[in-house]
Amino acid sequence: MNNKEIKKEKTIFLKPPNPAQLEYIEHVEGSALVVAGPGSGKTESSVNRCTNLIVKHRVLPSRILLLTFTRSAARMMRAKISKQIPPGKGELTAGTYHSVLNSILRTYSHIIGYKNNFTIADESDAEDIIQLARTAVIGEAKTELFPDKATLRKIFSKSVNTKTPIRKILEEDHPDYKERDEKIYLIQQKYNELKKSNNLMDFDDILTNFILLMQSDNVIRAKISRHFQYIVVDEFQDSNLLQIDVLKELASEHKNIVGVGDDFQSIYAFRGADHNVMLDFSKHFPEAKIIKLEQNYRSTKQILGLSNAIMEQAKYKIPKHLFTENDDWLKPQLVEPDNLFEQAEFVVDKIMETHESGIKLKDIAVLVRSGYHLNELEMELKRRGIMYMKFGGKRFTDSEHIRDVISFLRIIQNPTDKISLNRNLMLLESVGPKTAEKISENISIDIEGIVLTNNRLFEKKNYFGQLNKLLDLTNVCLKNNWTTQEVIKKFLDFYIPILEKKHDEDLNKRKQDLEALVNLSGSDKNKILENFLTNFATDPIDSSQTKVKQSTEDNDCLTISTVHASKGLEFHTVFILNLVQGMFPSSRTVESELAYEEERRVFFVACTRAKKMLYLLCPAFMNDFNGKGYFTQKSDFLTEIKELNELTEVYDFGKYIKEKEQNISDEK
């Protein structure tokens, strides 16, 4: 192909873009912020922009970096781009911050004092290490009020991601602990020492160590930045200040960075996301172009009318007005049942009615602010025999038995990881933290593998036989170049008998989880142990991934979910429960303006999941945690909308009750 023929190449779009989308797609040089409302074709536009760079501007795919907040989103977008470009062009780099930076650090980690087989410690691992650091600083005796390991991890992470001193975080979030700031700082130092000595990095370290690498060597910084000539950041509103520093380093040689997101959908402050990163984009990346995608292709005019009104009350925002060319439909329905049980019965009745009208259960969702708000509904769904999938609960990867297996794999990947070794040692009968530490102190790593240096200290202990089995198994796995699945199967031969002794009631469920882990480890992307552990840490497995997909034609399931877990999804019909003061907005947010404003955005996200029908439920009577009843107040997010009566329709609940009673009477 000659140059003239190359110049004639042009991007063929699957769907004609609207003017705002086209402006984004055709943006090439310099920084830009794409403010993309829900249902505005954000993902498709990002795919088309990358395609346009490759086809029209002859940019090599390998020079494009696409950062996403989930690995599944990265895989999906990369696959779409691959289908739209000529074969043989190669692939662009797409992944989460942690997966992309992890790959870079594996190459250059020696520059910042790490071996390239470092282990990534996820949240649970980090808390275990923090507990060791906590004990080293304050001992085990509970002589004073002091934060536990989970609270300490959140404090340390928030301090790093928001670049806020620990003292200030304690004053704002944990005033009861503010006088313990010096000891908490010492625990943080000890925590960092333990990670470094065990060749471990937590999630925050991946970012801070990448920045350290880039600032330590200008030649490497320039090489990495020039390699990624064009950078696109999806879901930019979920970024934090530390990630902004990462982006500045990546774009330091060219400034070709595009952030794509919606400040109205910034709802992850509890993970360190900073709502201001979008509002302050031009401060971080001067002379940035601002492009707004406001045309919605998902929802009806009526749903968007309410959604716009919700955000008109917001104090901190990039002004925008969502609109659509979709057909008119019914207004959002404002429903006021007497109590939670009537709410549950009504929702299930309407789900059945909607399903019988031809809408599949998988196209219906019930959303709540917090998982416990679903209790009464779940009881009613089970009573009526309706299949459902629940999202927003405990992750599959947080289970104790899964973490035991992962600890063994981490030892095989990184034999210097004594944190994981100690966890495996505590599987042995009569071995607790102190004994595990004593054994660990008498273990060395040499050419033979992991060796117990002083057998006499332990040979009369009742766990000595098991200890030798564990060490022999570890060394066999270290010496053989086995796949992840093969290593897991070897370990399970050792581990299952221990599990059977420790657990009785839920043993079968635990065995099913372990079987699922074996199956997951057999996929192509997980066959190599290092890849599996990286995927496990940077993209934790949801429990739904361990089961047969339930959104198929043959296995149609309702979705019940927290709003946070539903973000990015869409449904024909959506029910939002418990829209009363103290529940939505949560009582925890009323004293903080920033938290209250985020709560408003959570409500906006919930409403904009709906394509056709939206039900807003406000129970009139509830019980508190002590069982005491009280009359509720409708959510401020509704009552503050002056035109609420025009934007919604009050559902005739009295008529519904009478018809229900009549139906029951007729059946008798």
Image (spheres, grey):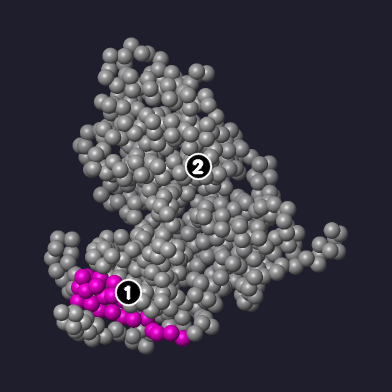
Q: Is 631 placed left or right of 229 in the picture? A: left
Q: Which residue is labeled 2 in the image?
A: 522
Q: Image height check: is 567 above or below 247? A: below
Residue type at mark 2 is Gly
Q: Is 94 placed left or right of 581 in the picture? A: right
Marks 1/2: CA distance? 39 Å
Q: Can residue 202 be seen in this view?
A: no
Placement of the C terminus among the 4 image quadrants: bottom left
| Location of residue 285 in the rendering, given as x and y in whole percent from the top left corner | 60, 60
Residue at 24% x, 83% y: name it. Answer: 656
Q: Which residue is labeled 1 in the image?
A: 352
Asked which quadrant contains residue 661, the reply is bottom left
| Location of residue 401 in the rendering, given as x and y in whole percent from the top left corner | 34, 39
Q: Considering only order in the chain, which callout, 2 or 1, is on the residue closer to the N terminus?
A: 1
User: Crowding near pointer 2: few (<14 within 10 Å), some, many (20+)?
Assistant: some
Residue 16 lies in the magenta stretch: no
Residue at 62% x, 63% y: name it. Answer: 47
Proximity of marks 1 and 2: CB atoms separated by less than 8 Å: no
Residue at 51% x, 72% y: name it. Answer: 39
Q: Which residue lies furthest to the front in this view?
A: 668
Asked whether 91 or 624 is in front, the reply is 91
Element under disc 1: helix
